[in-house]
Image (cartoon, grey):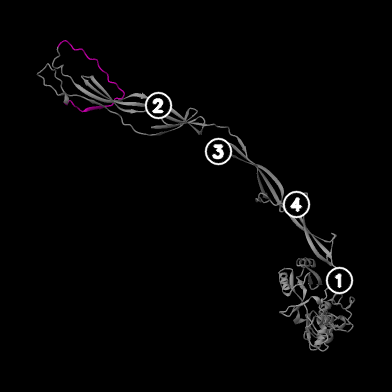
Amino acid sequence: MNVTSVLKDGVVISSSEEIVSTVAPINELVRVGTKQVISSNNDDKPQLNTETNEIPAKETVEEEKTPEVMPEQSKPDSKPSAVEETAKEEQRIREMRRDVTNFETLYQDDDTLAEGTEVEVTAGKEGYTVVTVTETVRDGQVVSSKEDVKEIVPPVNRVVTRGTRKQSQPKTITNPTKTINIDEDGVDIGVNPSDEVYYLKATQNSEDKSTSDNGDTVITPVVTNIYAKIQSQEKVITVDEEGHPIENTEGYIFLRESIDKKREVAVDGIVTITQIKTRTYKQKEIKPTEKSVADGDGSYIKSLEANHIAKDEETGLEFVDNQIILSTRDGISKEEVERLASEYKMSIVGHLIEANYYQLELSQVKSYLELKKLMEDLQQNPMVRTVELNNVQRYDTNSDETAVVAPKTDAETKTQIELAATKSDLEKPNDPFGDDMDGWDEENPSGDNWGLEVIRARQAWKLLKDANKGEIVDKDLKVGVYDSGGFIHADLNTFAIVGSRGTASEKEEELRKGEEHANHVAGIIGAKMNNNYGIVGVAPDVKLIGFSSKRDNYSNK
């Protein structure tokens, strides 16, 4: 059996046993004789055969016992009797151990065990020699003895593992500082928060403590940075080329835009970044075909130039090869249109303010396909409502034909364009148009008649007169106007009024009390021409049918 013991400072702190082998006991064998021995002097007694003196052995166990040898008795002088001469003889066989050898204790070092700790790996056992002893005993006395070596068992040395690892006292270990960046909601925002998005609001210091397996205390300093989001705002500054502030950009051309950022920290620590956009403008040159903003509402257009008229051979369409006409959605400022135009190297040369129409001119001549591609790109911009070519329509002022006449030569083209633009050939109504009437000038629309100038009404009247033998409006043409009343005015050619009750005098009185809006609308449509009174309508002297919404069936319709 192996016994494994763990010792610490000479004291057994644990022990375990393991059976290695089982050794059976060695029994002592003794032979006991039963043969009678007759003296040689007594011839009358029969002789026993000693060679057949084999008797069952009597098994006994006797370990490490040396039989006692009795001294031989001296024989008397007298002759023994026959009975005395008879003796018993027996043989005894036994095993015994001799030459016991002590075991040694062997030590082996182990640096994984703490110093002072011992672990018994193998238990020690003594060595010995097993001998077989054969003895002949007669009359209770050993008369002969013989020993034979049966087995030699060597000793088993005791093996002990001895710890050599030095034990140190527990110590404190400090790790490098750990930094954590979080926002105000406690969410981790990474190692390097952007200084364009966050600013440091507060810092907290703490420690994380733990104990290692060997008893050391581990401390990790923790720095928690709490960040807040930066507030942002935008500021736009408009300046001229010399850097002087501009409040109104009308009359200026947009050149460029630069963006700067200004970081400000308030008393309470809140950080604000202001994005400053500086937009630089160049003062526009006042051309003969334009008027300053001070005249009327500021609308203006650029006259047609003969050297920029081109023709698409496939469609036969004539157009201005360096211009397009663009209209914007409501709420889009001229400043935004200028920025858009500058992206495509264009400038504004005409602007109909009320209608949100812009005449844009390119810095270079473009082909028909190039202009179409440019218009497709512009149409994708959410600010743009429509975009189209600046088409050219020709007519012969000396002809009674209504068809458009296409000139055959460049010289003829130039001549007819000049004829079409001759103001002396156009109608000049004598209607006063109120107090703000500055004549007729389609190239610089202004005054109370600016709308008719913008749509080139006089050119249209001329075409209509040429087509209708001197009449602008067909005599049988009637226009219905639905409004809140009115329709009775010296400058209106009212044919009928529908939707009022009562006598003619009552009806007239009632309608005269109607809102001015109805007369305003009706006047724009068909106010009389050349009556030295009021204004001129788009379709002068057209017969009007007024539908009043102030009565019965026409209410709220």
Q: For residue 557, what is the image quadrant?
A: bottom right
Q: Who's the residue at 20% across and 12% down the image? A: 74
Image x and y of residue 533, in percent: 89, 82
Highlighted range, magenta: 52-78
- Looking at the image, do the residues carrying marks 1 and 4 touch, with CB atoms under 8 Å apart? no
Side of 201 where 254 appears, left or right: right
Residue named by callout 4: 271
In the displayed structure, 226 sits above or below 22; it is below
Instruction: Tell me where residue 453 appears, x and y as whole percent.
Output: 84, 77
Q: Amino acid at mark 3?
A: Asp
Q: Of callouts 1 and 4, which one flags the residue occurring earlier in the amino acid sequence?
A: 4
Disc 1: which residue: 287
User: Label 3, label 4: how many angstroms apart (C-alpha)?
Assistant: 48 Å
Q: Amino acid at mark 2?
A: Phe
Q: Secondary structure at mark 1?
A: loop
Task: Please state which of the two labelled residues, at mark 1 or mark 4, is closer to the viewer.
Answer: 1
User: CA–CA distance between discs 3 and 2?
Assistant: 40 Å
Q: Is residue 539 visible?
A: no
Nearer the observer, 9 or 521: 9
Q: Are marks 3 and 2 in contact (CB under 8 Å)?
A: no
x and y, in percent, of residue 450 in the image? 84, 76
Whole-angstrom CA distance, mark 2 to mark 1, is: 128 Å
Residue 356 vs 247, above or below: the answer is below
